[in-house]
Image: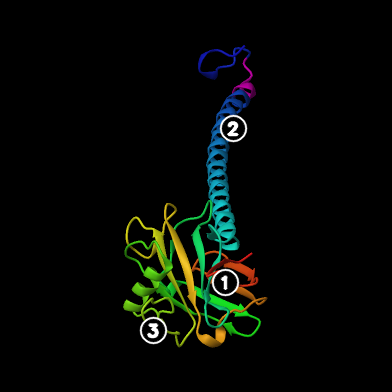
Amino acid sequence: MPGLYGIDMDNNPSNVGRRTRRGVIGIEAAIVLIAFVIVAAALSFVVLNAGFTTTQQAKTTVSQGLQTSSSVLGVSGTVVGHVNGTSSSMDVITIPIRVASGSNNVDLQKSLVSVKYFSKTVSYDNIYAGTLETGTFASLSDALAAAKTASLIDQNPLDGTSPATPTNSTAIVYWSTNENNNKVLDKSESAILAIVFKSADRPAQLDSLKVEVSPSIGAPLTVERNVPTLTNTYTDLA
C-alpha cells in the first residue's frame, strides 16, 4: 500500500515512480483535451461566421439579380394617341407609367434613362429629352406647352392658336401625381411618357409601334401596340 508522499509501504520503490507518472500523464491529457476543445470552438465560430456572411452575400446577390432582371417600371393605364386632323395619323402618344410592385423609386433624369422607339418604318435608339419635374398637368396640351417653354420640344402640335410640327421625334415625361417636385418617380407618384412625332414618323392606321424605356437599374419597360382605325381625336391603342 502506498503511504503519504508516494512512499510505498510494501518497500517497492518502482511502484512510486510508476504511479506518480500516471498522475502527471492524466493532468497533461486533460490540458491537451481542454486545448482541443478551445481550438474546436474557435474554429466552429469562424466557420459559422463565414457561413452567415456567405448566406448574406448570396441573399444580396439574388436580390440584386431579381431587381436587374425585372422591370422597375410598369404601365398604369391606357396608351392613348392624339390624331392629327389633317393627316389621319397620330402626332402624339402617351403612356402612363408608375413604379412596378416591389421595386424602388426610379430616377427619370435624362442622363439615367433612354427611350427607344420602333415602328414599321423608323428606329431610334434614344429620343428622351427629359422630364418636367415641377407641378402636375391635367391635360396633354398643357404639358406640351410647358415642355416647349422648357425647350424639351421645339414645337407644340397641340397649340390651339398656332399648332406646329416638331422637327424631331421626342419623348418627355410629365407628372399626373407629383409629391416632391423632383425627377424621381416615387411609389406614390404617377407620370406620363409622351412621344411627340415629327411629320415623317407619325404612326398611321394599321401601323405597329414599340417603345422601350430603359432606366439605370432594372430591365426595360417594353410597350407594343397596334394602331387601329383612327376615328376619334384621342384613340386608345389596344
At numbered mark 1, what does the secondary structure look like: helix, strand or loop? strand
Nearer-the-camera pick, 38 or 103: 103
Residue pointed to by mark 2:
29
**Distance between the alpha carbons at the discs numbered 3 and 1:** 23 Å
> Which three-letter amino acid code belongs to the residue tagged 1?
Glu
Nearer-the-camera pick, 121 or 115: 121
Mark 3: few/some/many CA within 10 Å (<14, 14-19, 20+)? some
Residue range corresponding to the magenta coloring: 11-16
Residue pointed to by mark 1:
212
Q: Answer with mark 2 or mark 1, whichever residue precedes in sequence.
A: 2
Q: Answer with mark 3 or mark 1, whichever residue precedes in sequence.
A: 3
**Distance between the alpha carbons at the discs numbered 2 and 3:** 90 Å
In the visual, does 19 lie left or right of 198?
right
**Distance between the alpha carbons at the discs numbered 2 and 1:** 73 Å
At numbered mark 2, what does the secondary structure look like: helix, strand or loop? helix
Query: x, y percentage for residue 19?
Result: 61, 23
